[in-house]
Structure formats: structure tokens, C-alpha cells
Image (spheres, helix red, strand yellow):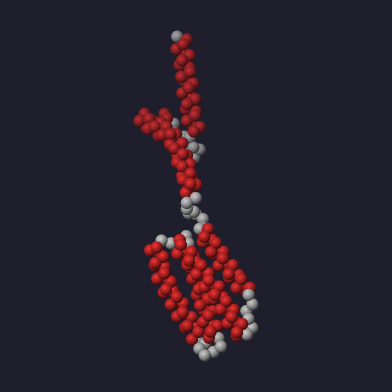
Amino acid sequence: MKKFLLFTVLSVSLVACGNAEQEASLPKDEPFKSVEDESPETAESNEVEVSEEKNEEPASVDSEENTQEVNENGASEEIPSEENPLKEQFLTELDAIVVELENQPQGETQIEMDEIASLTYKAWDDALNKIFATLEEQLPTEQMDKLREEQRRWIKEKYRVASEEAALHEGGTMESLVKISAQAEFTRERCYELVEKYMN
């Protein structure tokens, strides 16, 4: 009889401790539901949900860790959230050309201004050729073929725009300067366009 009483007291204590642990594990923002207010079926389903949630927690932690591992492993192959290093390199080089050209003297005579405009155009044309050569190595054949066609149309458009702007000064001393300057500006824009569009 004493053993039976001892066993009953221990059982009641364990059940009380279990309820206290359940109450402690409930989130603070959820109101506490009394088990007495629920039907036996609802209480059983809630117990199943609680036990499933406890089982799911470690799985979600594992899945997050796996996602992080995949991301860390994938980072060496692709850089989804960061800029392409090659793109960054070319943008830095293009920005350096802008600064260098802004700091050069403007020239006082027409000959000096024409010479500076020619050097400016050459700087941008060299940069464009370097970008295009890099893209030939990087892009798939089909995409590069399309880019070559696009580039041919762009060259025609560059000469058309430059000629139209120069025609406004036809016969004057500014005609050649305007034409070369227009070509230089058109080429500068194309450099940035190709880097932004194709070096991703």
C-alpha cells in the first residue's frame, strides 16, 4: 500500500512538472489555453501539434545551415549579390579615364583643341576595343555574334550623329572639333553601356 501511495505521488508530481514545462515553452505572445476548457479530441490534436513542432524545430535549423552551406559553397562559383570583379575593374578603369581627361589642359588654339579632342577620342576608342576583346573571350558564341551585329549598327549611328552635329558648323573652324568630340562622347557612353549590360 505504501508503494502504491508513493507511486501515485510521484506520478502526480511528474504530470505537474510536465504541465509547468508546457506552459513555460509556450510563446509569450500566445495566450495560455487551459486543457480543462478543451474537448479530449482537441487536447489530443494540440499535443500532437506541439510534439510535431518540437520535432520540426531542429529540422528547420538544419535546413538553414544547409542553405548557408550551399550559399557558401556556391559563392566560389557565382557571386549573386556582389558585382562581378571584372565589371568592377572595367568601371574603375573607365572612371579613371574620365578623371584623367578632365584634368588635362583644354588648349588655347584651334589646333591644340583639335589635338586634345583626338586624344580624348583615342582614349575612349582604346577602352572600347579592350572591353570588346574581353567580351569576345567571355560571352557565348551566339551572344557574341548578336553583339557584333549590334556593334556594326552602333558604329554607323556614331558616325551619323557626329556628322549631323558637325554639319551645324560646316565650313567653320569648329567643324572637325565638334565631329571628333561627338564621336568621343558617343564612344564613352558605349563603353559604360557594354560593361553594364554584358559584364554581369
Between 46 and 58, the one lying in front of the other is: 58
Q: Looking at the image, is 118 positioned above or below residue 89?
A: below
| Residue 122 x/y as whole percent | 54, 75
- Kindly give the residue lying farthest to the left in the view shown: 41
Q: Residue at x 56, y 78 (%)?
A: 118
| Residue 103 x/y as whole percent | 63, 73
- Which of the 4 image quarters holds residue 50? top left
Quarter of the figure with the N terminus: top left
Q: Is any atom of residue 39 visible in this view? A: no
Q: Residue at x 41, y 61 (%)?
A: 140
Q: Looking at the image, is 185 positioned above or below residue 31?
A: below
| Residue 90 x/y as whole percent | 53, 64
Q: Residue at x 35, y 30 (%)?
A: 41
Between 167 and 9, the one lying in front of the other is: 167
Q: Is any atom of residue 19 visible in this view? A: yes
Between 110 and 62, the one lying in front of the other is: 110
| Residue 10 x/y as whole percent | 48, 18
Figure disc tally: 0
- Which of the 4 image quarters holds residue 60? top left
- Which of the 4 image quarters holds residue 153? bottom left
- Kindly give the residue lying farthest to the bottom in the view shown: 171
Q: Residue at x 48, y 41 (%)?
A: 65
- Kindly give the residue lying farthest to the top in the view shown: 1
Q: Looking at the image, is 146 positioned above or below residue 177?
A: above
